[in-house]
Image (cartoon, rainbow, N blue to C red):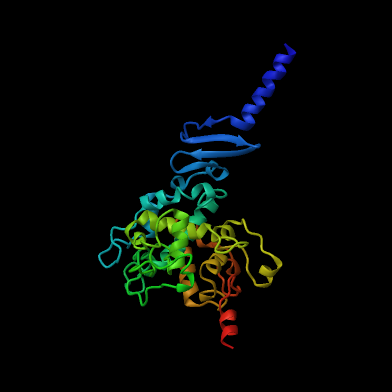
C-alpha cells in the first residue's frame, strides 16, 4: 500500500508540473494553463494562442474595447480624412494576436498593459494624423487620418540593398501603414517577418488594415539591431541600461521608444515640436483611457530631449564628408 501511494504521488507531481492542462473557470472560459519546467504558461483562445506566461494575463480585448478605440480616433472617418473606412478596432485586435504571446499589451498588470497600448497608439496617432490642417476636435483627435504618404517625393529605392532586398520593377516604397514604412529594405524585412511579399507588393500595406497594424506591432516589438532593446522592451521595463546608456542619458520609458524608432530626427535636440507632438498624443490617450498623464513619468522618462541616439547617423555623415 505504501509503494502504491508513493507511485501515485509521483505520477500526480509529474502531471501537475509537466502536462496538467487546466481549463479556465467561468470568468475565463478560454484560459488553458499548464506548467513547463515549473513555470506557468497559458493560452487564451484565438487571441493569445501560443503557450506563454504573457497569455496568463488579461488579453488586450479584455481591457481595451471598441468604445475606447473610437474615443482615441474619433475623427478618422470624417469626410476630410484620407483613409475613411480603412482603420478599425477589429483589425487592431486581429493584428495583435500575432504578438500578444510575446508580451505586446500583455506584460505586467493592467496598468502597464494599458500604458503600453496608449504608448504604441500614441506613436501611431502622431504619425498618421492630419490634425494640423483641420481644427475640429483639436489636433490630437485626428490619428489614423492617413494610411499612406499622400505626395511622395521619391520612390525610396536604395540600391545598396540590391542583393538582399532588390527593388521590384514599378514598386514604390513610400510611407505606408500605422507606423509608416519607408524604403525597400524596410518593406523587405517586414515582409520576411510577417511572411508576406511586401518587397514586390508594398501596396498591400495600404490595402489591408490588419497587415498595416501587424507591421507596426512588429516594428514596436522587434529590435532594430542585434544587442539592442526593442521599443517594447524599453517601455515595459525589460531593458536594463548599460553604463554607456546612462552616460548617454537613455533611461527606460516612453522617451526611449522615440529614440529607438526615430533616433536623432526627434531626440537629443531639446523639446522640439517633432518630439512634443508624439509625447502629446501619448498623454492625450492616457487621459482618454482614464489612466491619466501623470502616469507617463517625469520629463527625462517621458521625453528623449536630452538623450543621445541609440543609432547615430550624423557622426558618420560628418566623418565621411570631412
Q: Quadrant of the C terminus?
A: bottom right
Q: Position of residue 249 (x, y in %)?
A: 64, 71
At a point 28% along the width and 58% down the height, the residue shown is 85
User: Which quadrant, please, contains the N terminus?
Assistant: top right
Q: Is residue 207 above or below residue 264?
A: above
Name the foreground residue: 272 vs 3. Answer: 3
| Residue lying at the far top of the rendered structure | 1
- Where residue 243 appears, as percent x and y from the top left, is 71, 67
Q: Residue at x 37, y 62 (%)?
A: 200
Name above or below for residue 217 compared with residue 300. above
For this orientation, the residue located farthest to the front is 163
Instruction: Answer whether residue 238 is visible to the viewer in this image.
Output: yes
Left or right of 128? Residue 318 is right
Q: Residue at x 62, y 56 (%)?
A: 238
Q: Residue furthest bottom?
A: 322
Residue situated in front as seen by the camera: 54 or 131: 54
215, 134: nearer the viewer: 215
Relative vertical location of residue 228 with respect to residue 11 in this rendering, above or below:
below
- Which of the pair 23/49 is nearer the observer? 49
Q: Is residue 286 visible?
A: no
Which of the 4 image quarters holds residue 240? bottom right
* In-image side of 2 versus 112 (left or right): right
The mark tally for this picture is: 0
Residue shown at 53%/43% (left/top)? Answer: 57
> Residue 280: horizontal and vertical position, in percent?
47, 68
**Which quarter of the picture shows residue 127?**
bottom left
Residue reaching furthest left?
79
Q: In the image, is 151 to the left or to the right of 31?
A: left
Amino acid at each position: 500500500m505504501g509503494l502504491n501511494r508513493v507511485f501515485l504521488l509521483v505520477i500526480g507531481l509529474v502531471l501537475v508540473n509537466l502536462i496538467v492542462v487546466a481549463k479556465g473557470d467561468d470568468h475565463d472560459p478560454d484560459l488553458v494553463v499548464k506548467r513547463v519546467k515549473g513555470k506557468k504558461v497559458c493560452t487564451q483562445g484565438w487571441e493569445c494562442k501560443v503557450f506563454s506566461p504573457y497569455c496568463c494575463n488579461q488579453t488586450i480585448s479584455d481591457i481595451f474595447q471598441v468604445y475606447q478605440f473610437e474615443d482615441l480616433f474619433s475623427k478618422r472617418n470624417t469626410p476630410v480624412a484620407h483613409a475613411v473606412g480603412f482603420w478599425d478596432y477589429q483589425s487592431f485586435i486581429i493584428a495583435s494576436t500575432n504578438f500578444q504571446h510575446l508580451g505586446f499589451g500583455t506584460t505586467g498588470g493592467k496598468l502597464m498593459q494599458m500604458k503600453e497600448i496608449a504608448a504604441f497608439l500614441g506613436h501611431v496617432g502622431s504619425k498618421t494624423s492630419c490634425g494640423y490642417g483641420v481644427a475640429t476636435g483639436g489636433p490630437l483627435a485626428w490619428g489614423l487620418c492617413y494610411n499612406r504618404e499622400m505626395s511622395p517625393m521619391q520612390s525610396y529605392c536604395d540600391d545598396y540593398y540590391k542583393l538582399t532586398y532588390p527593388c521590384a520593377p514599378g514598386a514604390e516604397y513610400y510611407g505606408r501603414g500605422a507606423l509608416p514604412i519607408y524604403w525597400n529594405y524596410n518593406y523587405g524585412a517586414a515582409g520576411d517577418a510577417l511572411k508576406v511579399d511586401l518587397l514586390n507588393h508594398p501596396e498591400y500595406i495600404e490595402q489591408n488594415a490588419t497587415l498595416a497594424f501587424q507591421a507596426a506591432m512588429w516594428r514596436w516589438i522587434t529590435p532594430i539591431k542585434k544587442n539592442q532593446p526593442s521599443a517594447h522592451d524599453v517601455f515595459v521595463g525589460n531593458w536594463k541600461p548599460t553604463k554607456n546608456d546612462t552616460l548617454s542619458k537613455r533611461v527606460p520609458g516612453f522617451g526611449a521608444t522615440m529614440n529607438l524608432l526615430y533616433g536623432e530626427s526627434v531626440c537629443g535636440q531639446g523639446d522640439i515640436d517633432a518630439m512634443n507632438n508624439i509625447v502629446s498624443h501619448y498623454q492625450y490617450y492616457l487621459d482618454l483611457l482614464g489612466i491619466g498623464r501623470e502616469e507617463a513619468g517625469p520629463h527625462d522618462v517621458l521625453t528623449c530631449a536630452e538623450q543621445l541616439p541609440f543609432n547615430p547617423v550624423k557622426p558618420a555623415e560628418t566623418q565621411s564628408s570631412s
